[in-house]
Amino acid sequence: MVATDGPAASRWDRFRPALPYLFILLPAVFALLRDWRPEVLALVLLAGAWHWFMVTSHPGWIERPVLVIVYFVVILAVIGALIRIDTLFTVTALAMFIQSFTLISGWWAYAGLAATAGVLVVARPEQGRTPSQMLFSFLVALLIASAIGLVGQDIRDQNENRKVMIAQLREAGAKLAALAEENANLQARLLTSAREAGVLEERQRMAREIHDTVAQGLTAILTQLEAADAIDDTPAVRSRLSTVRTLARESLNEARRSVQALRPAPLDEAQLATALHGIAAKWSQSTGVPVSVSVTGDPRPLHAEVEITLLRVAQEALVNVGKHASAGRVGVTLSYMEDVVALDVRDDGAGFTLEAANSENAGGFGLIAMRQRVIRLAGDFEIETAPGQGTGISATIPAIPAIPADSEPGSFDRAGNGW
């Protein structure tokens, strides 16, 4: 059977199921208006109900040859009876010519045509017809029905070919869309690779600069500290020198890790929240200022760039508090939200004016660097401060989830080897 639904169905496919009912209803209306006969009404209702039961309500039954034969035998018997009563119902027999090619496949469709033509010829109440005349009428009816059926079959084949072509075009369109998406992804990967190559080149340049300046300077400081420790070994001096030596070594290790593009040491073995607790405790121990660290939301691993940026912001903010704020206490809050993660660092120190914060010559480079780090990740950076009212620094960054380290372009070994 031909599908009568779906986007590829033609108007003929959608209209065809209603044809048998029309061929039954139209002659019935004219026949009953001309001469009301209950038997005509009963036979018409029987024909319509039989077609509905066998074809419309159970389309799968037509796939079975035996049930198709039963359907044709009953419907042709009813149509023959109607033609015997009123010749207007000859029109109804024409619907069975169409049904023969619609419901029966192959050469068996011509058997349905022959049966329908035979009923049409035999059932017409014409007196005085000879057998040869009836045979001639049968052959003419069969010839006309076959011609009409062949035309209908050709139209149906064209519809099927059109549907196959439409399906092929849709498949080709889907493949083209998938290819376009793949090309877009490839282009995005190429752009990402180019950007990563540029980042890597810049990191290498900065690594050389750090190696030649900061790292060499820290190494020299450590050498001088060792010499000073040998000269003056009083407990107070030794304690101070030990603290300075520890800070210098940590800074040197951080410089080495930065050169190798690794995560900061506090993040190497811990999540961001744990790392913040660690650097806050160390800072509090070295400055004597109490720090409270609180975490809200559901802590989860984030992209390395996000965690590094927030950690650096926290470190720089604490350094600024230690240098300039004269604070009595500091609060650090890390907030995990659905789409963003926020870091707030607040103190009750001296505060300052925002004009001073924006002045690089006035010692505000740390704030500028923090802002640049956050904005680079499409985040927001805000400062709330006033003289005598403390300072609040807030950094909000999209909560980009973590990816495996071995899948990051340009990622390095975590061995942490020095130069």
Image: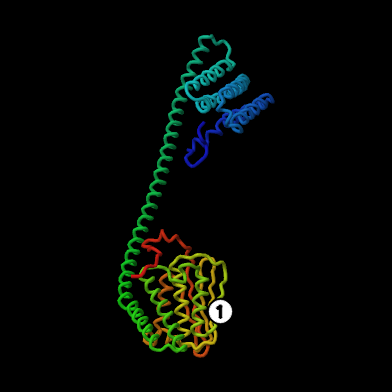
Of residue 254 and residue 167, the one placed in the foreground of this image is 254
Relative to 344, is 213 on the left or the right? left
- Looking at the rendering, which quadrant does residue 358 occupy? bottom left
Query: Is residue 26 visible to us here?
Result: no
Of residue 108 and residue 311, the one placed in the foreground of this image is 311
**Residue 289 sits above or below residue 399 on the image:** below
Query: At which x and y percent is residue 119?
Result: 56, 18
Residue underneath mark 1: 292
Please name the residue shown 36% across and 82% down the image: 221
Relative to 240, is 90 on the left or the right? right
Please name the residue shown 59% across and 32% down the image: 56
**Residue 418 sits above or below residue 109 on the image:** below
Query: At which x and y percent is residue 25?
Result: 60, 31
Query: At which x and y percent is residue 89?
Result: 58, 24
Please name the residue shown 46% across and 69% down the image: 267
**Residue 362 sits above or below residue 214 on the image:** below
Instruction: Point out the image quarter for the C terminus.
Output: bottom left
Relative to 256, is 31 on the left or the right? right
The amino acid sitting under disc 1 is Ser
Query: At which x and y percent is residue 362?
Result: 39, 87
Query: Is residue 146 visible to us here?
Result: yes
Relative to 232, is 82 on the left or the right? right
**Residue 368 sits above or below residue 29 on the image:** below
Mark 1 surroundings: few (<14), some (14-19) or many (≥20) residues within 10 A: some
